[in-house]
Amino acid sequence: MKGRVFVIGLGLIGGSLALCIKGQHHDCYLTGFDINEEQGKLAKMLGVVDCIADSIEEGAKDADLILITTPVQVTERILDLLADMPLKETVLVSDAGSTKAEIVKRAEKLTEKGITFIGGHPMAGSHKSGVSAARGLLFENAFYLLTPEKHIAEEKVNLLKDWLKGTKAKFIVTSPEEHDYLTGVISHFPHIIAASLVHQAEKTSHDQNLVTRLAAGGFRDITRIASSSPTMWRDILLHNKEILLQLLSDWQQEMKEVAAMLEEQDGEKIFQYFEKAKKFRDELPQKQMGAIPAFYDLFVDVPDYPGVVSEITGYLAKEEISITNIQIRETREDIIGVLVISFQTEQDRLRAKACIEHYTSFETSIGP
């Protein structure tokens, strides 16, 4: 496809989308803009974009596709700006935010001018941020939700899919309202629960100093998403307020039922509660990418000697295998420890397992 693409916001998502478009559509010209001038210069230097615009108006005026890849509250302000700018009548505008109903509503000024806006949400991410972390394969096999309003012609949706074909993502078309409910259930609400578990542990640690020492392993894993950006989650929660308030009300009722089981000492109900949860959880897709980025852990039994960690990471670097996290468990002098290495994809974990077994005699095992 030929044309001019303008990406506003050159972070991980914006940079990765730019790489996907450039990789698929070699004849297009890609312009970027970021409020952080250093990010813009870096994006140009890395070849993520062809040039950097001095302003949003400069980059938007001749664009055939405009992608807004900023935090949702910033996206609202950018939509207002675009609505007051002279744009091509045929331009296609989309975003990449985690909430959609409020964004689509804010875009009404654009649509009233005859401009096509289609909400978008690529469900992929990374522990890294910034344009230097951008990857052309970030969205491969991930779900990419598109939320066109009913009056949007199907050919416009297909045009956006064509522009984004290089993501190799799985596109799902849904309404803005359904999007916000679904992501509320499987992404936004779990982030609240993870943060609340951490808060509970922190408060308990004031009187029980062993809490901090013991809050590792499984506790650290199930609360990993609580380390996400506070600014981003503040904005997401405020945008999806009504749905999250309803989910919180449902959760409080759920906890009341659990409390009643305990008060009644009803062993059978308690068993069935966990049995039903286990059955549903075990039936969930294991290798499919979802709304929350997955982490794939590899356990390596290592002897405790200086340089063992750098030795292993050196082998992984040699094979160009990227890791997302690394930690040591149960290690004492002269005793075998457990090195836990986390990866972003199952393919990276399997490659790492083969790599370590090739270069060393250390035993490895796949985490659950």
Image (tube, grey):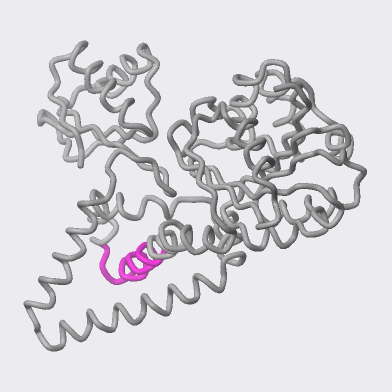
Residue sitting at the far bottom: 264
- From what the image shows, is residue 89 above or below residue 267? above
Q: Is 224 a magenta residue?
A: no
Q: Residue at x 61, y 64 (%)?
A: 239
- Image quadrant in which you'd find residue 211: bottom left
| Rendering coords of residue 158 (x, y %) | 62, 38
In terms of depth relative to the viewer, which is nearer, 196 or 86?
86
* 280 on left or right of 245: left
**Main secondary structure of the magenta stretch:** helix
Front residue of 139 and 264:
139
Q: Quadrant of residue 318?
A: top left
**Residue 9 at x, y percent in the picture:** 70, 39
- Please tell me whether residue 202 belongs to the stretch shown in magenta: yes
Q: Residue at x 65, y 19 (%)?
A: 46
For image coordinates 19% across by 22% down, the residue present is 305
Give the side of residue 6 with respect to residue 209, left or right: right
Question: Disc count in the image?
Answer: 0
**244 and 21: which one is in front?**
21
Viewer-proximal residue among 224 and 140 = 140
Which segment is the magenta one?
Answer: 195-209
Give the x, y percent position of residue 259.
22, 83
Q: Which residue is depicted at the point 35% across and 55% down?
A: 223
Quadrant including the C terminus: top left
Query: Residue 108's spot in the image, x, y percent?
Result: 78, 59
Residue that protrudes farthest toward the left in the picture:
267
- Horizontally, is 83 left or right of 96 in the view? right
Can you say which quadrant of the picture contains the N terminus? top right
